[in-house]
Image: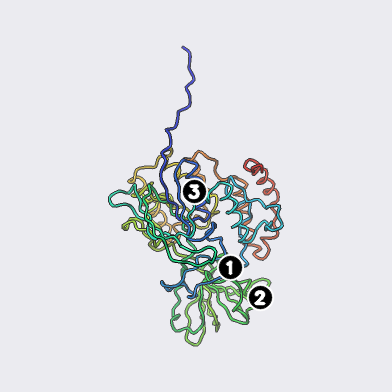
């Protein structure tokens, strides 16, 4: 008998959906591209007048320095003027659109560039793939929710700013309501600050602010400043402030209670354990027993997930800064695949993660990728939460992928039939993380992984487009 070779199985034709993407930052831009590549009809809603999201710098700050007043004028940027990336550009870029330094004197060619270069990269990305034609600028989303008794249809209510461009005068808003098959939430999570709870703070006479409202060291001259937190922003800001302040005291919950260390290279900056209490005479008492009379407390304490426009009738909640329930950080089981989230994970290389999440979403919506049943997805979520609880990991670390981000990325890549994270990218990330920890002052300008840089650029030739 002759064995006839069978043709490869044919995928069913993709189903085209009408999809709303909320936000035109990095997550929204790559989601729009992947959705359109898969044949979907996409509208992106962006409240600003340009793409870039959290990477768009705004020198203005909110009138409430702690950003607690619900009626405050909200500034969506959390960037400080001097911010540079804490990842090398080779690691940071989208997988198939490398973040290569431009041969242009007006561009930042440093390996760890400033925030403006990231915005320009995202603008280049949007231009390269024709994404801006899908974006409604100056349009804020007021409501996203399922049509009654139909989770496969979603109401998006938005308001577009009406203005006279010639005179730069705003005349109000044009309100619109539309129906979509699906909504992809890409609104970021760097706008609603988390504030540390400090015993005695209501009677403490000093000034407080959150790093969300920090732009430059102006106002810190000759001050005694306390920074709460040991994140990247705290590391950068503390060093910047130390150049003008009288004293800088950094607190961290990840060190032992007795910790009191003068920071290398500084005679006016110390690392402490957490604050025990503050008092009406201006004093701040640390768990290590030290007492400092301070002028200002700067909260570098991160942000809360916040979706004021989203109404799922209580199906998706934010509880203890856990957004859930979500299957694999993306789909609420009871509303999948019609509602999804891109970009929630923390402690991860963001742009490639956004790219893989959006590929998965696009393939699921088109019918090329199958999800488990809602019941199976919910069981998976419950098992994940139980694992966190058994490991004594608090709810607010649910989206923290430190230590498992690349395994997660590769899991996403598998159903999409696309390559996972490159080995050079993983090794370069590890090298940069180690250098940042050991050499926080200079890691952005001195490195010893040139072999990995060469490997990355060799890999980029697969994607570099000819002009």
* Residue that extends furthest to the top in the rendered view of this protein: 1
| Observer able to see residue 413 | yes
- Label 2 SS: loop
Closer to us: mark 3 or mark 1? 3
Residue located 41% across and 60% down the image: 174
Q: Of marks 3 and 2, which one's residue comes earlier in the chain? A: 3
- Label 3 SS: helix
* Residue 129 drawn at (x, y percent): 56, 46
Above or below, 6 against 43 in this view is above
| Observer able to see residue 344 | no
The residue labelled by disc 1 is: 80
The residue labelled by disc 2 is: 243
Q: Of marks 3 and 1, which one's residue comes earlier in the chain? A: 3
The residue labelled by disc 3 is: 32
Q: Are marks 1 and 2 in contact (CB under 8 Å)?
A: no
Residue located 44% across and 45% down the image: 41
| Label 1 neighbour load within 10 Å: few <14, some 14-19, many 20+ | many
Give the distance between the C-alpha atoms of the residues marked 3 and 1, in whole angstroms.
28 Å
Q: Of marks 1 and 2, which one's residue comes earlier in the chain? A: 1
* Residue 246 drawn at (x, y percent): 63, 81
Q: Is residue 191 left or right of residue 128?
A: left
């Amino acid at each position: 008998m002759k064995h006839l070779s069978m043709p490869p199985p044919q995928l069913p034709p993709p189903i085209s959906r009408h999809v709303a993407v909320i936000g035109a930052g990095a997550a929204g831009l790559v989601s729009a591209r992947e959705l359109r590549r898969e044949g979907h009809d996409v509208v992106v809603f962006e409240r600003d007048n340009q793409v870039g999201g959290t990477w768009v710098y705004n020198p203005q700050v909110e009138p409430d320095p702690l950003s607690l007043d619900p009626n405050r004028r909200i500034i969506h940027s959390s960037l400080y003027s001097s911010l540079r990336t804490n990842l090398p550009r080779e690691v940071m870029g989208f997988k198939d659109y490398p973040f290569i330094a431009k041969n242009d004197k007006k561009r930042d060619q440093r390996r760890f560039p400033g925030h403006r270069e990231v915005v320009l990269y995202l603008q280049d990305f949007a231009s390269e793939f024709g994404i801006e034609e899908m974006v409604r600028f100056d349009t804020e989303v007021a409501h996203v929710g399922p049509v009654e008794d139909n989770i496969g249809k979603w109401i998006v209510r938005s308001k577009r700013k009406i203005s006279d461009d010639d005179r730069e005068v705003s005349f109000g808003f044009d309100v619109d309501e539309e129906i979509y098959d699906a909504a992809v939430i890409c609104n970021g999570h760097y706008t609603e600050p988390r504030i540390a709870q400090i015993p005695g703070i209501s009677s403490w006479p000093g000034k407080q602010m959150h790093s969300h409202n920090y732009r430059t060291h102006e106002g810190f001259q000759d001050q005694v400043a306390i920074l709460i937190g040991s994140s990247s922003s705290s590391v950068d800001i503390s060093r910047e402030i130390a150049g003008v302040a009288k004293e800088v005291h950094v607190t961290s919950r990840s060190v032992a209670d007795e910790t009191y260390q003068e920071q290398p290279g500084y005679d006016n900056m110390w690392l402490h354990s957490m604050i025990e209490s503050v008092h009406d005479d201006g004093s701040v008492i640390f768990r290590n027993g030290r007492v400092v009379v301070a002028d200002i407390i700067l909260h570098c304490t991160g942000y809360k997930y916040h979706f004021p426009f989203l109404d799922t009738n209580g199906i998706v909640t934010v509880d203890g800064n856990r957004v859930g329930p979500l299957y694999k950080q993306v789909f609420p089981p009871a509303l999948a695949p019609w509602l999804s989230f891109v970009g929630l994970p923390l402690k991860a290389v963001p742009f490639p993660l956004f790219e893989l999440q959006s590929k998965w979403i696009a393939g699921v919506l088109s019918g090329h990728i199958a999800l488990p049943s809602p019941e199976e997805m919910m069981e998976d979520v419950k098992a994940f939460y139980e694992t966190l609880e058994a490991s004594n990991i608090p709810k607010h670390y649910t989206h923290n992928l430190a230590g498992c981000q690349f395994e997660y990325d590769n899991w996403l890549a598998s159903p999409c039939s696309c390559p996972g994270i490159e080995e050079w990218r993983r090794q370069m990330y590890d090298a940069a993380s180690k250098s940042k920890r050991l050499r926080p002052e200079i890691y952005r300008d001195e490195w010893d992984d040139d072999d990995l840089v060469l490997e990355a650029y060799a890999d980029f030739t697969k994607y570099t487009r000819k002009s």
